[in-house]
Image (cartoon, rainbow, N blue to C red):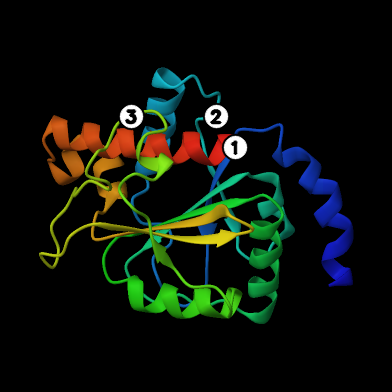
């Protein structure tokens, strides 16, 4: 705890005044670096359409590093295993309860691993499915049916789950949607333009909601 105390209070002051995104690096062998064009494309879309001023080149930060406190918004994705050390767990817990926001987008196959690790971060909290009338589905663009389906994997409906702290949504886990694939350059997955547009608009909703709440 004492090891984190000084940087925590010094860096926390930056959170309220910045619009910066970072990709979260984690251990376990999962490909945290997947979808390399996704976040830059989403940032460009947001800067153009919802008046954000986000650095167009997102950085990547280790989950156990105090550097995460420089970013009010972290994005995490991948296909496989996730492992948080004790130091990672403590750092991420402090980050989230002090004002940070984490969006985890399951790129396929991540769900059983990340849910197990999140239970270590917050043993007394449960992922709760967000209802379709949650403000995150209406913050910039309207999604009356909730989270859109971008890529088909197991013929399951898309779901958005949240973790809350003192009634604030601190973490969003998007499952069976694959928003990140929809954010990537169009030639990578050959998604129709209307599908990519849905993915980008939902991503903009998530960013706008995270910055304003």
CB-based contact (under 8 Å), mark 1 and mark 2: yes
The circle on residue 203 is none
Examine the rendered structure and indicate whether residue 98 appears above or below residue 17: below
> Residue, x 39% and y 20% (percent of image)?
49
Tag shown at residue 54: 2
Task: For mark 3, give the secondary structure.
Answer: loop
Q: Are marks 3 and 2 in contact (CB under 8 Å)?
A: no
Please indicate whether residue 213 sits to the left or right of residue 114 in the image. Answer: right
Which residue is tagged 1? Answer: 20
Q: Position of residue 85 (x, y in %)?
A: 62, 79
The tag earlier along the polypeptide, 1 or 3, is 1
Q: Is residue 130 above or below residue 201?
A: below
Above or below 199: residue 27? below
Residue at the (42%, 27%) spot, across then down:
46
Q: Position of residue 103 (x, y in %)?
A: 46, 53
Residue 189: x and y in percent read: 16, 46
**Residue at position x 63%, y 50% in the image:** 100
Above-or-below relation of 193 to 22:
above
Residue 141, disc: 3
Disc 3 packing (10 Å; few <14; some 14–19; many ≥20)? some
The quadrant of the picture occupied by the C terminus is top right
């Amino acid at each position: 705890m004492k090891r984190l105390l000084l940087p925590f209070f010094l860096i926390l002051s930056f959170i309220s005044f910045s619009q910066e995104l970072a990709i979260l690096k984690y251990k376990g062998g999962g490909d945290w670096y997947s979808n390399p064009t996704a976040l830059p494309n989403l940032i460009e879309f947001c800067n153009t359409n919802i008046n954000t001023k986000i650095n167009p080149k997102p950085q990547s930060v280790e989950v156990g590093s105090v550097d995460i406190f420089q970013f009010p918004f972290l994005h995490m994705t991948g296909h496989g295993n996730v492992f948080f050390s004790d130091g990672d767990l403590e750092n991420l817990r402090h980050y989230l309860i002090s004002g940070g926001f984490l969006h985890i987008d399951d790129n396929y196959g991540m769900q059983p691993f990340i849910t197990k690790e999140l239970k270590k971060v917050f043993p007394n909290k449960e992922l709760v499915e967000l209802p379709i009338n949650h403000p995150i589905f209406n913050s910039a663009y309207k999604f009356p049916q909730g989270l859109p389906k971008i890529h088909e994997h197991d013929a399951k409906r898309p779901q958005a789950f949240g973790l809350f702290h003192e009634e604030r949504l601190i973490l969003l886990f998007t499952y069976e949607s694959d928003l990140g694939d929809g954010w990537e350059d169009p030639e990578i997955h050959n998604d129709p333009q209307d599908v990519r547009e849905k993915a980008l608009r939902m991503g903009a909703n998530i960013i706008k909601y995270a910055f304003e709440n």
